[in-house]
Image (cartoon, rainbow, N blue to C red):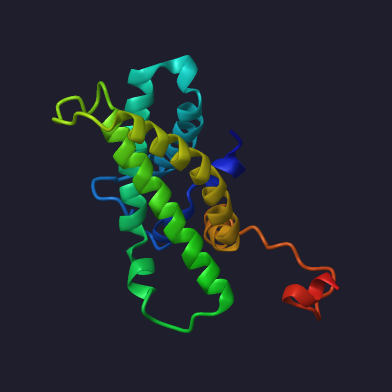
Amino acid sequence: MSVKLSKIALGAWVWGIAKGTLPIIGVTRVSRVEDAAKAAALALLFLMGYPWWGDVAHEWAGAGMFALFIAHHILNAGWWRSLGKGRYTPARVLQLVIDLLVLLAMLGLMVSGVMLSNHVFAFLPISGGMSFARLLHMASVYWGFVLLSLHLGLHWNMILGMVRPAAGGLAAPQPHCADRQGPAALL
């Protein structure tokens, strides 16, 4: 993975780092945050290789993604606080719907993953519902990929805006028509 791509993966953490803080309790160095972002990206790729890696590795990587998902929401608590504020434009409604659908897909993955677990969460007294859990897990995976792609795409400019200062202040590419902005620039 190139340095540029690993910097883009930092997304939610870059703001805190740019402010001179490390937004994760117990983390004392920027390199640890970068390592966590790389781990999240690699874990997603690793989880797709379930047939090759087996149950145990898949379950542990899934549990790690569960922890990273919770950390993501803790680090982005401001988003939750902003839900009742401001005007709801069609673009904001679209983002909210996609974000809530991503949340549902991830919750479906977590609940079904715990239900299907034979190793990591085997200590929990869960019995029955395995066929439902498998269907929920597979539907959540497929919809999760589509929705996460949309989520990332809709937040791409924000992510780049946070990454640029941490990447040495790379300038944003200038549009060809400086007098046009937004959809009018496409005409």
**Which residue shows up at 52% across the image and 73% down it?**
92
**Dividing the image into 4 quarters, which one contains the N terminus?**
top right
Point out residue 121 in the picture as x, y percentages from the top left corner. 22, 29
Q: Quadrant of residue 56?
A: top left
Q: Quadrant of residue 62?
A: top left
Point out residue 120 in the picture as x, y percentages from the top left corner. 24, 26
Eyeballing the image, is 134 above or below 8? above
Eyeballing the image, is 185 above or below 36? below
Q: Please name whichever residue, 7 or 98, is drawn nearer the observer in this view of the structure.
A: 98
**Dividing the image into 4 quarters, which one contains the C terminus?**
bottom right
Point out residue 27 in the picture as x, y percentages from the top left corner. 29, 45
**Which residue shows up at 39% across the image and 67% down it?**
79
In the image: residue 54, left or right of residue 125: right
Q: Could you tell me if residue 14 is visible in this image?
A: no
**Which residue shows up at 33% across the image and 26% down it?**
59
Point out residue 158 in the picture as x, y percentages from the top left corner. 55, 63
**Which residue shows up at 48% across the image and 18% down it?**
51
Q: Could you tell me if residue 91 is visible in this image?
A: yes
In the image: residue 57, left or right of residue 94: left
